[in-house]
Amino acid sequence: MNWKEKTTIWAECRHLDFVLKQQLIELTNNEKQLEDAFYKDLEFGTGGMRGIMGPGTNRMNIYTVRKASTGLGNYILKKGDEAKSRGVVIAYDSRYMSREFAFESAKSLASLGIQTYVFDKLAPTPQLSFAVRYLHAFAGIVITASHNPPEYNGYKVYGEDGAQLTPQIANEVIEEVTLINNELAITVKNEERLIADGLITIIGDQIDRAYIDKVTTISENPYIGNASDISIVYTPLHGTGNIPVQAALHELNYKHVKIVKKQELPDPNFSTVQSPNPEEKSAFEHAIVLGKKEHADILIATDPDADRLGIAVKDKDGNYKLLNGNQTGAILLEYILSQKRDKGQLPENGIILKTIVTSELGRAIAQKYGVATSDVLTGFKYIAEKINEYNRDSTHSFLFGYEESYGYLVGDFVRDKDAIQAAVLSVEAAAFYKQKGMTLYDALLNIYEEQGYYQEALKSLTLKGKEGSEKIELIMNQFRHSPPQLTNFTVVSIEDYHTSTKRNPLNGEEEKIQLPQSNVLKYFLQDGSWICLRPSGTEPKIKFYFGVNSNSIENTKLKIAEIQSQFMQIVDSYL
């Protein structure tokens, strides 16, 4: 069926939602946009789905949400009555249509006789993960598009462990979703009737309280808030973090917390920022103004679904410096391990988890404390998968997990990155070092002095359409068969996660990589530097990661610039 035929079916559908019908009529004047809305089905991948909202099979709307939920529901029904009765927990963020999509998901599942639980107000992604575990549910859904632009929304699915689905399980769900041919034909029962029948249960305060109680347990020095005069500025960037972050800091007795008022309340337009992304400096613009006024020691920001945390701290000149994900991770890791060691609570089988594109600085810090490090593929679900493995076989005690893209996890009562946990621990670390006359930036410089100066960089190429996909495939194939030849830098190890092999090109020795297959290449150079290539799973992009270390900031900057320049010249030659 071509896109024009699909358009006709939607246009002639008598029960089509009124707003969507009006939007569809408006689209008839723009054939290019109309084609984009119908030329394919919105892809339901291993992480769920994400897209622009509006009418069409390639858009986020109540019908594509019903299709995804019915597919998930059919998967659950095949797992038996226990799965059906344990049910699904559903959370949603502050975006347009998030609450509506949450209840369409609930109605779709409940109409199949599956128990559902829906939050009574917007809730962070990590709290959804917690709620799945707390309620012993079989699955979870969160309606969010993280820090994407306002016109987007998304649908993420979680398993019974509270983690995003691993590829094997996700593929089973995807198969059920693709079997549904006509999303417009899905019927759902009345919401009030489903609530009255007990198939939809509204949840809220009990889960909120239980979650905050757990968050406070990650503190290494739970009484430091009483003694500290640390000044904190926080912005939720119009998202879900506002209430739980404030609640957690209040529970730990931090008294000087100022909220960026312009960004405190939910706003689906994210009208005060170019992008509600704490990885970007512009997101801190209002926080910096308030920070200077209040002489704040630390600025913290959470993204709209509160799974990512960004922080800014004072440098030696008193200016606010934004830390990247690798730097924040290093500070939190050093703080956690040093405190556990000093209290005699560092387990002999302790381990930290990081992704393959996260800085090697974490490994160096862990090694100092006699703690093991395990690398996983990009995606927090793989960190969660390892936590499950360690809980089953007791080979290791999980201490900390993180990724360079501003995601951190301390307490494994959540199985996804958790900005509320990270906010609490970042503030605590700042309070701890302030008592020693130091800022978090001073603490970072101390780590660099001890471990060497590490720096990472990321380059992305956006290559759209069929031609773009072919170019990305060409780049990966070229590098797979011809490792980069760099002046002054020798490749000593090649990790190919597609073939699950690690090879030494100098002597031909090869070993197996014990991780899931993924189209990723990583090269290690003789001086400890590394380069990683990874096509994006959600966007028409290929990403190039670089990591180096040296004995000074200046040498590190020169080295990463040289490696990056040489490597990208090779990439350009393939385009």
Image (cartoon, rainbow, N blue to C red):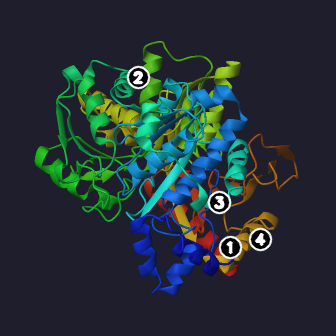
Residue beneath label 3, please? 534
- Picture coordinates of residue 10 (x, y %)? 55, 71
Residue beneath label 4, please? 478
Could you tell me the amino acid type at mark 4?
Gln
Residue 548, visible in the rendered structure:
no
Mark 3 or 1, nearer chain start? 1
- In the image, which disc is placed on residue 214? 2
Looking at the image, do the residues carrying marks 1 and 4 touch, with CB atoms under 8 Å apart?
Answer: no
Residue 288 vertical position relative to residue 478 in the rendered view, above or below:
above
Say which element carries label 4: helix
Could you tell me the amino acid type at mark 2?
Lys
Crowding around mark 4 (Cα neighbors within 10 Å: few <14, some 14 to 19, many 20+) is few
Task: Judge depth for marks 1 and 4 and give the one in front.
Answer: 1
Say which element carries label 3: strand
Residue 216 vertical position relative to residue 127 in the rendered view, above or below:
above
* Cα gap from disc 3 to disc 1, whole angstroms: 13 Å
Mark 3 or 4, nearer chain start? 4
- Picture coordinates of residue 384 (x, y %)? 60, 35
Which residue is at 48% across, 27% downward? 411
